[in-house]
Structure formats: C-alpha cells, structure tokens
Image: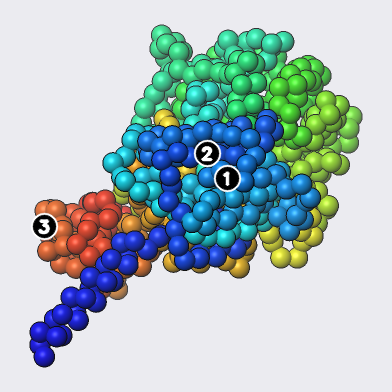
Amino acid sequence: MRKIHLLLLYLFTTFTSYSQATKPEVAIIPEPVSLKINTGQFVLPRNVVIAASAHPQLKSTVAFLRERLSVPTGRNVTVSKPSTTATIRLILLPTPDNSIGKEGYHLAVTPQNIVIRANQPAGLFYGAQTLVQLFPNEIESAELVKKTSWLVPCVEVTDYPRFGWRGLMFDVSRHFFTKQEVKQYIDDMVRYKYNLLHLHLTDDEGWRIEIKSLPKLTQVGAWNVKKEGYFGNFSPPQPNEPRTYGGFYTQADIKELVLYAKERFVNILPEIDVPGHSLAAVVSYPELSCTPGVENYRVRSGEQIMDWSHGAPPIALVDNTLCPANEKVYEFLDKVITEVAQLFPFEYIHVGGDETPQNFWEKSDAIKSLMKKENLKNLHEVQGYFERRLEKIVLSKGKKFMGWDEILEGGLAPSAAVMSWRGMKGGIQAARLKHEVVMSPTDFAYIDYMQGDVSIEPRIYATLRLSKAYQFEPMPDSVDAQYIKGGQANLWTEQVYNMRHAQYMTWPRGFAIAESLWSPKESKDWKDFINRVENHFNRFKIAEKNYAPSMYEPIFNVTKTPDNNVKIALSTEIEGLDIYYTFDNSFPDRFYPKYTEALVPPKDAVMLKVVTYRGKEPVGRLITMPVTEWKARAGIK
Ligand code: ACM
C-alpha cells in the first residue's frame, strides 16, 4: 500500500515537474488586447525563411527578426519574397482591417509556421516584438546559446494600442548621451512598443544641438566641468577647471538619429526649453537675458543656481532666463526654430516653458515698459506674451507648438498643446479648453525619482515605486477623450551619469508605463504584471541590460512610539517575500530572524540590516539603516 502511494507520488511529481518544465511561459509586455494560447508548439527549424514584400518600411522588422532568430540560435535565417511556404510570413493586408488600426497586428503561431498580418509596416514591427517575447528567454542573448530546441507556444494574438502617443523623455542636457547611446535607448524602448522619443536638448547644463546660424550655442553652451557626487550642490567651478565635459549632436547626427528612429517607427520630439532653463543659451549669447552686463555666468556644472525654498517659481541665483522684452530674443528663437523645424519631421516642437524664475524680470526696466505697453498685469502674463510670440514663430515654420503646463498660467497660446507634468490637472484644464494634451504627471511617470528606499537608491528628492507607475491612467474622467493624445515617462538626468544607470532608472517602470499606454485599461493586473516583469528581468540578465531590482526590497515605515521609542514597520511591494533582519551588525540571511511584526530596535543597537528572500533565494539587495537614520525618520533628536 505504502509502495503504491510512493509510486503515485513519484509519478505525480515527475509528471507535474515535467509539465512545468515544458509548459510555455507566455509573458508579453505590454499585455496584448487578445491572446489565445493553443495546444502545440512551433519548433524553430535549422533553416528559417522570413517572407516579406520589398516594402522599404519592412526592412527594420526583417533585420530585427533575422538578428534575434540567428545570433543566439545559430539558425540560418534567410529572407524571401512573399511565399506561403516560408517559416515566418510578414503580410501587409491588401484590404484594411479597421479593428487593428495603424499600429495593430494579428499574430498566429501554429506548429507549421508563424504569420503576422497588419495594415501598416508599424503593425508588423510590433507583431515581431511580441513574437520575440514568445521565444525562450535565451533569444535575448548576444552570443550563441547551447540549446537544441527553440520552441514557441502556439498562439493567436490580436493587438493594437490604446494611445497613439507612447513616449519616453530622455534628458540629454544634464548629462550628454552620445548618438550611439540614444540609438541604444531607442532599441530598448521599441521592444515595449513605445513610439515617441522626447529629447530634452537644452537646459542650464548644456545646449546639445548644433544651430549653424548660432555657433556659440555649442562652442560655449555645450560644455561644463565634470563633477561627481550629488548634483545640485556641487562646489562652484573655479576658472582653472577644464570645461571639457559635455558634447552636442551635429546636424548630421540629428539626421541620423531621426532616420534611425523612423526606421523603428519612433518619432523624435525635440525640446528647446525656454524662457527658463536657458543658462547655456544665455552664457553663449548674454545679450538674450534681461541682465546682459553680468559677465561671470557659466554653463552650470551642478552647482546651485536656483533657490526652491519659497516654492514655484524658483528664485534664480544667476539669470537663466531669456528676456521677453528683448526683440533680439525673438530673432534668436526664429533662427533656432527654423533649423530645428528643418531637422525634425515630427509635427510638434516642444518649447519648454517650465520653472521660469521671475526675479530678474521683476527688476528689469525693459520688462516694466513691456508690461505697460502690452497691458500685462503680472509676470505670468509676461511669460504668456513670450509664449504667444513663440507660438507664432513655431507655426510659421509649419510646426505645432507644445509646452509644459506652466504655459497655461499666463493665458494659453491659441493652438498650444500641453504636456502635463505637475499632476494631471494642467492637462485636464487644457483639454477642457479644447487643447491637445500629453500626460506625464510626476506622481506616476517621473522615472528620475527613486524607485525604492533612499537607504539604497541613488538619492533624489522624491520616490515613484513601480506599483505607483503601474497605476498610471492617462485618460482622466470627465474630459473629451479626443484631446488626450497619450502619455509618457520622463527621465531627467541630473543624477544619471551614464547609460547603465539610465537603463536602471527606465526599467522596470518603463514596462509599467508601456502597459498603461498600450494595453486595455481593463486588463491591468498587478500580480500578473509582476510575473511578467520577472520574466523580462531574466531576459534583461541574458541581454546584459541593466534594471532596478527595487521592487524586491522592503518599504520602511518608521514612527515614534508614545514612550519616545522607535517602531520600524516593514512591508513589501510584491507578494511572497520574506524579510530577514539583524540589529547586531552581521549580515542577515534566511537563518536569521524573520520579520513578522514592527521592530523596536534594542536599546543599544546602532544598525538595522534587512534582506528579502523568496523561499531559499535572496532576491533583494542588503539594506542598511543606521540609528541616526531611523531616529531622524521618527522625528527624534
Ligand atoms: C519639469 O519637470 N520641470 C517639466
């Protein structure tokens, strides 16, 4: 009897582990509109034929599939004319299927072949992204993998995006990222079906785009002093420190990037941030400020130049603004916008408008007489005047005008589109006024913020956890949906010094925002999303791309008890984790005390160390919190 039990147990465990080992794990991000998993599998043959028409816009899709399906697998991948016997068929539908729109696709995997159908080349490109995500994780490898069979589960997918504007903003001003790095960023974003790259090209720390009629912008404005540490409070650079840190894109570089992006169905939105955040321009051409006599301004190297202690708008310690009362400013902007408009085919130009200090304007006689002449009641209206003049310039070059939501404050220019960042309210207000809107609110979409506890993350003044980013809902209730074009996540780079860190900040929150912008609202499911995120972490590991593991690490809630002691409550963002801790300075593992209830530090303890496990596997990084920190958080001196 006992033997039979054991035999049954053996058969059962063998069977279940067998079925689990071979059960295909389908983990697509962003979640498709409709996904049906059928029985059976497609096996990648030795010789793979991709059939596609000679349409020039199919080249990048074919090249992408060819590379991914050959490099890790060692398979021989060739390309043929349209053919019913090919392994993978990319088909542009001869009669439009209105259900999938311009970017949607149908993907069918059967044991015989793989077929992707779409109305437009973009749809085939996105179908190919989904297909690669259906392959085993090793498909991401940059090298040949020792694996004999490459199986894809049989599926039927119908998919299309919820929003047409699915953006990532990359700040290439605070730290310069090379043309090659921007291409890498594009390669990474399109894997998750983003279609818009917003390049923040100018700021106080650097002007990054060659303007041929204004050469000093890049001769002078693109360079500062390299500093490392916490940006914002660096020591002021000395005159003898070399100004060799930075760089810019030549116009040839920009053309190359625009083409590279276009081949991958990405539009590039250029941003020229004025009238604030303009120190690099002011240093290059001091006559553009309201304070032209001041000679000692330098492109910012991370030293303090604004005082935020009084809230917005900030007080500028050096004048980083263009002067709205100066006609030369509009001549300058006409030149800049003329060249920018010629370089970027995208229909919008973003002209910033955020965080403009008013203190230098306030003291300016030129501004005072402009206010009198134009009947402007306050300095917001002065900025409104500036924005309306700039709007005319942008429109005169055949482009649409877009700015951050501060442009609402001085009276919105008639055709302006608004990018809402200080929450959703600016976007809602603009949509009610029948203006186009892109949502990128700090509370859900600012991926420069920390994604975990400050004890371990590179320090920034705010936090945006993955779970919050996953709640991003770009469409507010009670506005006409036609005005909400979509949304984007913004990667400001004051504290992002290199590409590995840019990846760390972008992923996995970029997965969450991608899903908010592409997938149906009703399909959101946090637990299911996390399972898929973990699959993609494994893909990133194989691809040697960086990501943040912060979702595995505890959330600390430190409070003061009535008897003036400290209580440290810990929780986790995702389910199924155990937290182990020590107060004795040694390194906790799963043989140490397991967290079950809020901790009261022993009287003489000086250090809390915590680590998270899933079963026997450590998953989070070690977090160390000294007594000074927990006392500070509890408000105990
Ligand atoms: C912004 O974050 N200042 C647009």
State yes or no: discs 2 and 1 in contact (Cβ < 8 Å).
yes
Task: Give the answer, above or below, for where 16 lies relative to 308.
Answer: below
Q: Nearer the viewer, mark 1 or mark 3?
A: 1
Q: Which residue is mark 1?
A: 85
Q: Disc 2 marks which amino acid? A: Val
| Horizontal side, residue 314 vs residue 228: left or right | right
Label 1: which secondary element: loop
Q: Residue at x 69, y 33 (%)?
A: 55
Q: Residue at x 41, y 37 (%)?
A: 75
Q: Which residue is mark 3?
A: 584
Q: Earlier in the sequence, mark 2 or mark 3?
A: 2
Mark 1 residue crowding within 10 angstroms, few (<14) / some (14–19) / many (20+): few
Q: Position of residue 387 (x, y in %)?
A: 78, 34
Q: Disc 3 marks which amino acid? A: Asp
Looking at the image, which residue sits at the far front? Answer: 85
Q: Nearer the viewer, residue 443 or 505?
A: 505
Q: Which residue is mark 2?
A: 49
Q: Position of residue 195 (x, y in %)?
A: 63, 41
Q: Determine whether the beta carbon of the residue marked 3 sits less than 8 angstroms from the nearest atom of ligand 1.
A: no
Q: Earlier in the sequence, mark 1 or mark 3?
A: 1
> In the rendered image, is residue 219 in sight?
yes
Q: Disc 1 marks which amino acid? A: Thr
